[in-house]
Image (cartoon, rainbow, N blue to C red):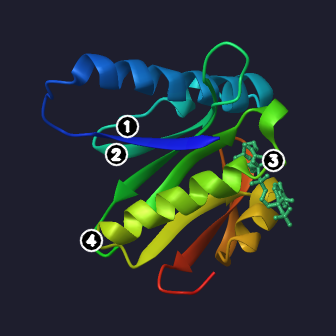
Amino acid sequence: MRIESFEILPQPDARDHEINARLAICHEIRRIVFVDEQGVSSDLEWDEHDSPAIHFLGVDTEAAYEPKPLGTARLRLFEGYAKAERVAVRKEARGTGLGRAIMLALEEVARSRGAEQIRLSAQASALGFYEQLGYLGYGERFVEAGIDHLAMSKLLNDAK
Ligand SMILES: CC(C)(COP(=O)(O)OP(=O)(O)OC[C@H]1O[C@@H](n2cnc3c(N)ncnc32)[C@H](O)[C@@H]1OP(=O)(O)O)[C@@H](O)C(=O)NCCC(=O)NCCS
């Protein structure tokens, strides 16, 4: 398994064609997981925050014919912290450590860009996944896209 990342900058980039092709792969995984599987409306799933953002793709390099993208996440950078969003692993790859590998890669990039903390909105069913990675929940639960969520955060200088 290989974790790839690519950045979409606000201004046009000479590599736009290649980058858009990779973003389309992230969108396809998100569509399968959030829209088809979880019933999130595609209107809510597609937003304007894919640019600027750093995107991650977990790719199965052992697949029979060609590398198969199986998981994705998005990282957005703010002053002093970063947000992890759209974390999704295709059903057939769950429980293999891919989600964890994507999150660790995302945290490493966030740290290297000066973020001291990661924040995210965790689906209630994924709380244990983030807790395993050292995230702590805070505040009240809330409903977003019809799904119960809790805000969570992790300080990046925490050893984990
Ligand atoms: C949540 C999700 C990203 C986890 O990805 P994954 O590849 O299955 O997770 P991993 O295999 O890397 O699991 C890492 C650890 O977390 C645990 N874990 C994974 N999903 C969990 C869950 N939903 N609840 C509790 N623990 C979980 C695993 O058991 C594993 O523990 P271990 O190291 O002790 O074996 C994946 O299930 C998914 O895409 N779900 C649907 C979309 C979703 O809910 N995304 C999160 C939106 S906030």
Q: Pointer 1 and pointer 2: residues touching (CB < 8 Å)?
A: yes
Find residue 79 and name its label. Answer: 4
Marks 2 and 3 sit apart, C-alpha to C-alpha, by 26 Å
Q: Quadrant of the C terminus?
A: bottom right
Q: Position of residue 149 (x, y in %)?
A: 70, 58
Mark 1 surroundings: few (<14), some (14-19) or many (≥20) residues within 10 A = some
Residue type, label 4: Glu
Query: Percent position (x, y) of residue 41?
Result: 64, 26
Q: Which mark is residue 53?
A: 2
Residue 6 position by quadrant: top left
Task: Indicate the secondary structure of the residue bearing disc 1.
Answer: loop
Tell me, yes or no, if residue 73 can be seen here: yes
Q: Amino acid at mark 3?
A: Thr
Of callouts 2 and 3, which one flags the residue occurring earlier in the amino acid sequence? 2
Mark 1 and mark 2: Cα distance apart in space: 5 Å
N-term-proximal mark, 3 vs 1: 1
Q: Earlier in the sequence, mark 1 or mark 4?
A: 1
Left or right: 31 in relation to 84 = right
Residue 123 shows which numbered tag? none
Quick check: is the Cβ at mark 3 less than 8 Å away from ligand 1? yes
Task: Kindly identify which residue carries mark 3.
Answer: 96
**Quarter occupied by the N terminus:** top right
Residue displayed at 27% across by 16% down: 17
Task: Check contact, mark 3 vs mark 1: CB within 8 A.
Answer: no
Side of 108 relative to 10 (left or right): right
**Residue 112 versus residue 76: which sits nearer the camera?**
112
Ligand 1, seen in the image, is in the quarter at bottom right
- Contact (CB < 8 A) between labels 1 and 4? no
Residue found at the very far top of the displayed protein: 65
